[in-house]
Image (cartoon, rainbow, N blue to C red):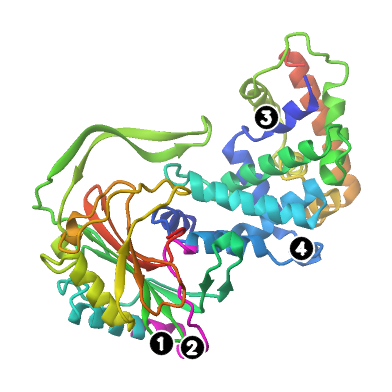
Amino acid sequence: MKTENLFDAMDLISQDYKKEAIEAMKNKNETRRRAVRTPIRIVLIAAIIASLFVGTAFAVGNYINSPAQAEKVAQAELKKMQDLGILSEKFSVEGIVAERVIELPVFEGEDYFFGRIWPHRYSVQWYMGSPEGNPYTVITQVDTAEGRIMAVTIEAAAGEDAVAYRVLEDQEVPVGYDEEKQQPIVEIRDLEYFDNYEDIIPEGITVDEMCTRLNEYWGFGGYTVVDTVDEFYGFEDVETPGGDSLVRDLPQDNYYLSVVFEGDQQGVPRYIQTVEFPGRVCMIIGTNHAVG
Amino acid sequence: MEDGKIIELYYRRDQAAIGETDKKYGPRCRSLAYNILSNPEDTEECVSDTYLAAWNRIPPEYPVSLCAWLISIVRRISLSRLRRRYADRRGGGEYALCYEELDECIKGGGDPQGDIEARELAEGINRALDKLSKTDRCIFLSRYWLMEPVADIAEAMNFSQSKVKSSLHRSREKLRKQLCKEGLI
């Protein structure tokens, strides 16, 4: 046996013993540690992930300068998006305290990040969604310079009485993780999918209407729907939906709609994506998809 | 933020999960990686790789103890990087010292049955740990699982360094006997 085997086997010892050791070392004086350089790569990784949701190139100053202010602006801007007919008027976050407000730093992308720039912004998030109570989950990214929503994710759980339009029977669903066996704990369940899009977007809204309204909201000079080619993340290059297609009918599997707005200094497409999860539907409107 | 909330962020594919993980467990992960690698750049890369692994593995995984789960990942990645860096065992840092110390446990054991399954070995180690006092067990795991320097263990547990060293010596001897008795070495 090699000594390496002992080290590797250590990872499989009892969780209780591991916790004991972690607890015992809690009192270690971390300030005595040698200086480790700023975790730049962590920021970079966060930015890759951020690129799925956010981005614009206009950041020049911080007009929103506190989390409380960001929350109020997000509430007002969501209302504006509802008034413009981008989002369904069925939901409201007015008077509901955001569960999380996170400040996100400026990040100037390198070629590694497809040359994109992420401005200073706040992520304001409301997690309310359940079929029994308020069914919505709303996550916004607010540009502190413009005071506008750069990206929004809105999700609605189907009501208790809703009828599933698609059921996947006997699916393995991970419900936990077995540390000893180092594998997920799964249960066999039926997964029910609903099409309650009217809870998140105006009924009957087409691709053209959605893009026109977003164009108005963001203040650009027009738009073009373009093909999505995203080999890196495995999104499919499917035929671009016509302008009169319904947003609710956007393809589901590995697809997002890419839209180039005139005057968008970012120079890359923004995107609209609809996603159906078991029990809920979701729409993501964002800037700078990872590849675009 | 509670672990459950952090995991919820991963499940929601919310980028804040990485930041919250780093805020809560970054220092510990960095400390462990540095103890193994003795190199700030490699340390950062391993910690970053750990977060990326966490992002890719949650979901579907749902760690019962996020801290222990992350430590296992960062430890594995760091050891793997070190082994790649040095084909021989002269890696430097705490790993090299830990290696020398644990090597005593299996010296002369040979490898008559080929590679032993890691799980079987882990069970043997668990049984040896069962027989240690809680204090000795904590010292042993702080040294050989968390790869902490003796000085740090002594400081954290308010012991002298010589007490920590003698505890480690006793524990290694017990481990060696246990593994011999079970035919694992």
Amino acid on which the number 2 mark rests in the picture: Asn
Q: Which region shows up in magenta?
A: A50-72
* Residue nearest the viewer, comparing A66 with B140: A66
Q: Nearer the viewer, mark 3 or mark 2?
A: 2
Q: Secondary structure at mark 2?
A: loop
Q: How busy is the neighbourhood of tag 1: few (under 14 within 10 Å), some, or many (20 plus)?
A: some
Secondary structure that dominates the magenta span:
loop
Marks 4 and 1, how far apart at CA: 34 Å
Q: Which residue is mark 1?
A: A69
Subunit bearing disc 3: A
Which numbered disc covers residue A36? 4
Q: How busy is the neighbourhood of tag 2: few (under 14 within 10 Å), some, or many (20 plus)?
A: some
**Is mark 4 in CB contact (under 8 Å) with mark 3?**
no
Subunit bearing disc 1: A
Mark 4 vs mark 3: same chain? yes
Mark 1 vs mark 3: same chain? yes
Amino acid on which the number 3 mark rests in the picture: Ala
Q: Secondary structure at mark 1?
A: helix
Q: Is residue B21 magenta?
A: no
Mark 2 vs mark 1: same chain? yes
Marks 3 and 2, how far apart at CA: 50 Å
Residue A246 seen from this side: yes
Which numbered disc covers residue A65? 2
Q: Secondary structure at mark 4?
A: loop
Of labels 3 and 2, earlier in sequence is 3
Pinpoint residue A212: horizontal percent, then vertical percent.
23, 75
* Residue nearest the viewer, comparing A36 with A53: A53
Mark 4 vs mark 1: same chain? yes
Marks 4 and 2, how far apart at CA: 30 Å
Q: Name the residue: 27% across, 75% down.
A: A214
Q: Name the residue: 65% across, 49% down.
A: A22
